């Protein structure tokens, strides 16, 4: 009897996405997260820029979940 395996999430290299799609993915993530940045307010453009920086530094990654057919951005955990 074959077992039904849950498909593993797939990391999507941010550099392989067209700029407009990358921007849409990041904007969606930023708007969904509702992150509190403290006392100072940041514009959507600033928040998108911060996430792009995290992606470039390898601190975050774009992940596609084939089961839910959704995309999110995951922050990498520090390994010490």
Image (spheres, helix red, strand yellow):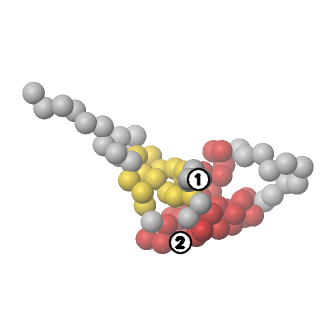
Q: Point out the tag, 1 or 2, that comes first from the N-terminus.
A: 2
Place residue 26 in its image quadrant: bottom right
Q: Which residue is mark 1?
A: 80
| Nearest to the observer: residue 62 or residue 42 | 62
Instruction: Indicate the position of residue 36 as horizontal and vertical percent values.
Output: 78, 45
What residue is shown with label 2?
Answer: 19
Q: Residue furthest front?
A: 80
How far separated are the C-alphas under marks 1 and 2? 33 Å
Number of callouts? 2
Image check: 40 left or right of 51? right
Residue visible at 85% across and 54% down in the picture: 41
Left or right of 13? Residue 3 is left
Q: Quadrant of residue 46?
A: bottom right
Q: Is residue 62 visible?
A: yes
Image quadrant holding the N terminus, namely top left
Residue 12 is marked as none
Residue 68 placement: quadrant: top left
Q: Secondary structure at mark 2?
A: helix
Q: Residue furthest left?
A: 1
Residue pushed farthest right?
Answer: 39
What is the crowding at mark 2: few (fewer than 14 residues within 10 Å), some, or many (at least 20)? Answer: few
Left or right of 42? Residue 14 is left
| Residue 17 image offset from top left, x and y in percent | 46, 68
Q: Are marks 1 and 2 in contact (CB under 8 Å)?
A: no
Does dot 1 land on a helix, a strand or a loop? loop
């Amino acid at each position: 009897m074959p077992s039904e395996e849950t498909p593993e999430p797939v990391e999507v290299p941010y550099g392989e996405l067209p700029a407009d799609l990358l921007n849409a993915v990041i904007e969606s993530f930023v708007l969904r997260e509702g992150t509190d940045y403290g006392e100072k307010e940041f514009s959507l453009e600033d928040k998108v820029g911060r996430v792009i920086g995290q992606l470039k530094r390898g601190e975050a990654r774009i992940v596609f979940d084939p089961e839910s057919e959704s995309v999110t951005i995951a922050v990498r955990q520090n390994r010490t």
